[in-house]
Amino acid sequence: MEPDRTCPQCGRKIPWGQNACPFCPGRWQGYFWTLRRDSFLLLICASLVLLFVITSFIVRINHDVEKGFAVQWYARGEDDLRAGRAEEALADFRTALSYSSAYSSGDNEQYELRLAEALTAAGNSLGSRAEARTYLLALLDRQPGNATVNLELARLAARDHSIGDAVRYYHQAIYGEWDVNSVVRRRNARLELADYLLNEGQTDAARAELIALAADLPTDPAVQTRVGMLLLRVGSYDDALKLFGVALRLDPHAAHALAGAGECYFHQGNYEQAERYLSKAVQQDPTLTHAGALSETAHDVMYLNPFNRRLGNVERGRRAAEDFNAALRRLQACSAARGIDLTSEGNDPLQMLFRQTQDLQPHVGQPSLGRDTDLLSRVMDAVFAMEQTSAKACGEPQGRDLALLLIAREQASELAGEQGGAHP
């Protein structure tokens, strides 16, 4: 049997089967210390978890606040950009981008694009264009098919008169990826390209773009008229007339379509049709002053031309005499503007022509002028010579003198056609 043992600390007997004294306070102190240490560690862990949750919540709230600020400044920039306030939009998008960069990179591309658009619209400084190009090229590296980015790069190249780069970026925009309204925005991009090429004097390239565009247009008189006007500018009168015809079938009172059709007929030499369409255009919209001037000129061409086969001899002679006197007045006004004395013996073309006309002047008022074909031709040759020489010396005329110059060109064209037909 195991002998009794005494606790060295408290002097009491240790019960059989136990190794340590159950009465000694030191044992319970260790136990309670162990219990306090575990609870402390657990409390520390719980505190850390709570702090992490609180911190995450605060960060999320902060990001939400910053996102709200970014969205507000972005919307404000959109409004300013649409209203044409590029400088204000520039500041708005910079602020939006600074807030957006703090919480996300997903929205930054859109913000950078709008910032680049604002920089492009803000002014002509090289610094603004260089900064805009930097943003756009970075975006293009990430999104090479982004049509909006390519369009902005095209506009920058166009502003720098870099035709090759502008055409390349415009084409990439036309065939690129648009977020919304892809058909309309592709058409508008091609229209913008055509207009740019016209302003740069690239008529053939502009004509090619417009013909490609005209093949697929909506049944909208405004769109048909707009493309027709550009085709008119490049001299594609037949193609333009087709579009104006479509526009007028959709809206017979469309003033600009009437004016465009009339101008096409005017340049084709069909002055009767030109005067009809142009006068209708002015009736619909009196502010179309150019159409009004062309209408008057077309009217003058028809009623000053003595070569109309339907005229009688008296009317033919009257017109030739009226044309001669009008051309002589133009010659005298041109010489006076240049300080040239027509009566002096000089070698100026105006003086020499004036001397030649003096031999014809006594015959101009004769009643037989309309019957004498040879005399009528000589008088009209003098009229054309006076108008053409005055135009070279003093610039393109207006009104009746322009009509006489157009008749001269028409007669020269008919004569060339007759000679070409006689000598194939």
Image: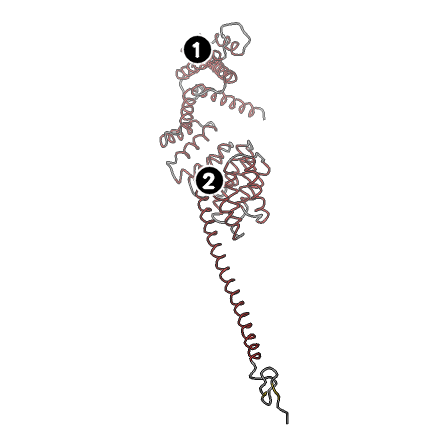
Quadrant holding the N terminus: bottom right
- Compute the Cα span from label 1 to label 2: 70 Å
Measuring 45% from the left and 28% from the top, which residue is drawn there?
Answer: 266
Q: Residue furthest left?
A: 283
Q: What amino acid type should be assigned to the residue bearing mark 1?
A: Val
Q: Secondary structure at mark 2?
A: helix
Q: Name the N-terminal-most of marks 1 and 2.
A: 2
**240 is higher (above) or lower (below) than 110:** above
118 and 62: which is toward the camera: 62
Colouring style: secondary structure
Report the residue marked by disc 2: 88
302 and 51: which is toward the camera: 51
Q: What amino acid type should be assigned to the residue bearing mark 2?
A: Glu
Please state the horizontal and vertical placement of residue 312, each as a whole percent of the image. 40, 18
Q: Secondary structure at mark 1?
A: helix
**418 is higher (above) or lower (below) than 333:** below
